[in-house]
Image (cartoon, rainbow, N blue to C red):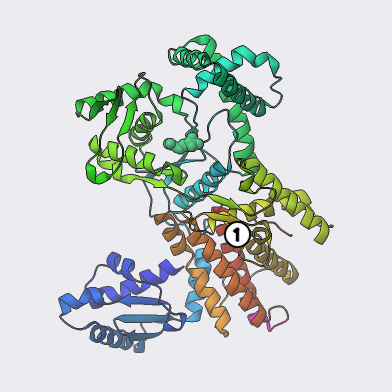
Amino acid sequence: MIQTAKTQIANLLNPLTQLPVEDLQKTLEKPKQFEHGHIAFPVFALAKTLRSAPPQIAADLAQKVQVKMQDGSLPFLEKVQPAGGFLNFTFKDAYLQKILFEGLQKSNVGFSGIGKDKTVVIDYASPNVAKPMHVGHLRAAMVGQAIRNLAGSQGYKVIGVNHLGDWGSQFGKLAWAYQEWGKDYTFANPMDDMVKLYVRFHDEAEKNPNLELEAAATFKRLENGDAEIKKIWQMIVEFSLKDYDRLLNGLLKVKHDAVLGESFYTDKMDAVIDLLKKKNLLKESEGAQVVFFDEKENMPPCIIKKSDGASIYATRDLATAIYRHDVMKGDELLYVVGQDQTLHFRQVFKVLELMGFEWAKTCHHISFGLYRFKEGKMSTRAGRVVLFEDVITQAIELVSKMIAEKNPNLENKETVARQVALGAVIFNDLVNDRVKNVEFDWDRILSVEGDSGPYVQYTVVRCRSILRKYGKALPAQPSMDLSMEEERKLVFQLMQFEDILTASYKQFKPNILAQYLLEVCGSFSHFYHKCRILGEAPEVESSRIAMIVATERILVQGLKILNIEAPEAM
Ligand code: ARG
């Protein structure tokens, strides 16, 4: 696709500029306006060595290229034009179509080998045991899975981890409450009953402060490996994991390669503490062991050990990062976690740097904002946490209702309802810059007309329906000039797909891809309204059908990377 064309131009410019092909390839860009051509070469880098003004350099280069065009050695070029400090190249339509279709033959359309031989470890959706997942985890799951797929599209080896919150003093409370009151509950709905136990503990502890001491003692027993408490803890973890699997994998199709909870790192923390001591970083403060930061960092110290000797979340994250780097061989460590943990990750990454780990700079906190629900059933005004599951079930309910009203004879209604509902929720999330809060407005999210997931899915469905009507075998390699502006625009846009994936991963911004899919849908819609397809002269018809094949494949691939399925009909 566009990379093939860039290579072509880089090879052409290499002898004319003496710049290495690889550098040229990187500097080639998309012209600001479609009318300017397909690829622009900014000549500014040459100004110093050539001691000449950029417009002059561009004009000279254009002339040299034109000479080559005249002798017939550049059959793929339509024209070359200098424009200020840029040299703009326009390809022959047939060439564009050819490389687009070559790109589409690959089994993984748009993928690149940029990350070859490198490993990315991504932490996402990591819920806290014994608590139902809330919308924050839903966001982490959706953003994380998309970034995971994007990393995969760049050829990285990806390890997705569920960093289960399965350790900490709250387990002392739960285990104690279970021993004391467990018999009062059936655990038919274990997550509900565990929340009830937890709430009951807090209610009772308010009346009887002794309970806190009991709980602390119980957690100590757990830390010391007491078999009885450990068994209760294990049961709680298993209940929770089952529930998370149902939601993450079952409902949302979010996958992890490893579940390594915080408990996994309990025996790896002494080494961290020893190293901190050796580096003289550990200081005593109000009975606790902490790491202080330089004043310019403007951060409170990072607590490593509490005054009672217990380790905390941050200590475990230090051990975790070292494990992900040393054992999992992660070249990049990504943490998809809400923005409320920004300070935590700044502290952890800074401590790693102070410990002398060069690789601390490869750690990235990929944060995201909050959901804001408009008035209605899920309004956050009601003051409760909105649960992961409620958002998904509500979406499925609404879509099922819409299908029942508008398209009651649809086949596989249930599957389609799930696909569209999830498509709506996921797309609505990923189309926004993740750092912003997301406005949750059901009407807009589910509309097939707006900038929504269902709109993209609907475009796919439309493409598929035209292809079914066409009924004939598709030409493997269409060749003809694109006579309409709308066709040219669409082809050019489709060719950007691989660059979009690269940019989307590099910046950890799935919204770049989501926005692109909307643009493709827009261009497709213009094309579809302007260009007659079925019933045209056979060469025109088959060429336009090929455009629909290309649009369908790229939209489906893009949606798949965002973890959205495309229904056959809707
Ligand atoms: N369990 C945490 C929470 O639900 C998120 C964990 C994120 N990952 C990490 N390595 N700290 O808030």
The residue that appears at 60% across and 16% down in the rendered structure is 178
Relative vertical location of residue 431 with respect to residue 338 in this rendering, above or below: below
Residue 369 in sight? yes
Give residue 205's quadrant in the image.
Answer: top right
Residue 271 belongs to magenta span: no
Tell me the SS state at disc 1. Answer: helix
The answer to whether 153 appears left or right of 130 in the picture is left
Q: Which residue in the rendered view is the most extreme toward the front?
A: 207
Q: In the drawing, does residue 72 fall left or right of residue 478?
A: left
| Residue lying furthest right | 409
Q: Nearer the viewer, residue 121 or 337?
A: 337
The x and y percentages for residue 429 are: 56, 54
Residue kind at label 1, given as amino acid type: Val
In this rendering, the answer to whether 481 lies above or below 371 is below
**Does 542 lie within the magenta span?**
yes
- Residue identified by numbered label 1: 556
Give the quadrant of the C terminus: bottom right
Q: For the residue carrying disc 1, how many other residues have a C-alpha within 10 Å: few (<14), some (14-19), or many (20+)? A: many
Give the magenta-colored segment's residue range. Answer: 535-543
Q: Quadrant of residue 360?
A: top left
Q: Residue at x 68, y 62 (%)?
A: 447
Count of numbered circles on the image: 1
Residue drawn 54% across the image and 10% down it: 228
Q: Is residue 291 left or right of residue 182?
A: left
Using the image, determine if residue 451 lies above or below residue 283: below
314 or 55, nearer to the observer: 314
Q: Is mark 1 within 8 Å of ligand 1?
A: no
Q: Main secondary structure of the magenta part?
A: helix
Does residue 565 appear in this view? no
Q: Position of residue 210 (x, y in %)?
A: 51, 13
Given residues 28 and 8, the one toward you in this image is 28
